[in-house]
Amino acid sequence: MDRVSGGAVALAVVTGLVGTTAGCGGGGAVADDRRGADPGGAVRRAADVVLRAGSAGDVRTAMEMAAGGTRVTIRGTGNYDFRGRSGQLKVLLPTGPAGRQEHRPMMEVFAPGALFMKNRGAGVPADKWVRIETASLADGNLVTGGATDPLAAVELLRGARDVSYVGEEGGLRHYRGVADLGQAARTATAEVRGPLAAAAKGFSRKGVAFDAYLDERGRVRKVRHRFSFVNAGKAVAVMSTTALEGFGRPVRIVLPPAKDIYVGKIRQ
């Protein structure tokens, strides 16, 4: 049988809006650093602070896509083990025209170098998972899965440049800047270096605009990235938000067993 390809998965996951990556968005507005500190250093260090926290017991994601007058939002909830570089999300696909949920929630499990998905449709049996190598995806799974891998979302900040301190919002320190994909890939932890390097090659522009919200310990509590690319001749704008809570809470991630991995051909 044919093996599952990353391209086939990418075409089906986000209801046709996500496909071949061609470019990504630019920078945000510059504001004064009212704290008088080094805003870029604070943001670049945030990834290490999160990794030292060990886990996030409450992870929420939202990916909003707009193309040709159509706007959809994909939301996810779950948790993440930063020490084990693995996590899990339940992802809700957009509702149908009548406002009803027409798709079963898609389950996603993140592991070093891999993404597992269940209930992704397109001919995959209901009790099976599909597995793709994230380094084989042109976007390094920053967009393809309908939710940016929380570890990758944080590691992207290692490439932060042109960073400004916006101000304090809800007890969090708001920073804005641009993440350089190439720099992030070179300085990221080994588990996400491959996917970020793939994204650095797959995106024609290497800068990803972001807004990062850090708490008093320097941990990332929320980060929003803005991507853009061309799919089927249409410009697609993507805003991906990852929120982290419950740091240090015990998290148990179970990878799908080999017998439950589907290796047949996937309909597109």
Image (cartoon, helix red, strand yellow):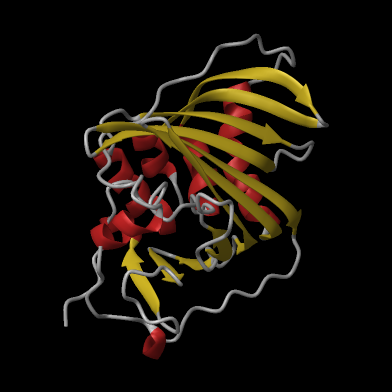
Residue pictured at 24% horizontal, 57% vertical:
7
Q: Residue at x 33, y 66 (%)?
A: 132
- Quadrant, the C terminus: bottom left
| The furthest residue to the bottom | 259
- Is residue 169 shown left or right of residue 155? right
- Picture mark count: 0
Up/down of 103 relative to 26, above or below: below
Question: Which quadrant holds the N terminus?
Answer: bottom left
Percent of width and height locating residue 266:
26, 71
Q: Position of residue 181 (x, y in %)?
A: 37, 36
Relative height, residue 103 to residue 159 (above, below) = below
Query: Where residue 212 sits in the image (x, y, percent)?
Result: 62, 32
Give the percent coordinates (x, y) of residue 144. 38, 52
Q: Residue furthest front?
A: 98
Q: Is residue 168 left or right of residue 114?
A: right
Q: Residue furthest top?
A: 32
Q: Nearer the viewer, residue 240 or 245?
A: 240
In the rendered structure, the answer to whether residue 201 lies left or right of residue 149 reads left
Q: Residue furthest right?
A: 171
Residue at 38%, 70% in the rendered image:
121
Residue 88 sits above or below residue 216 on the image? below
Taking depth in this image into account, of 51 and 144 the one nearest to the observer is 144
Seen in the picture, residue 192 relative to 73 is either above or below; the reply is: below
Q: Between 236 and 161, which is closer to the camera in this rendering?
A: 236
Is residue 23 visible from the viewing direction of this image? Answer: no
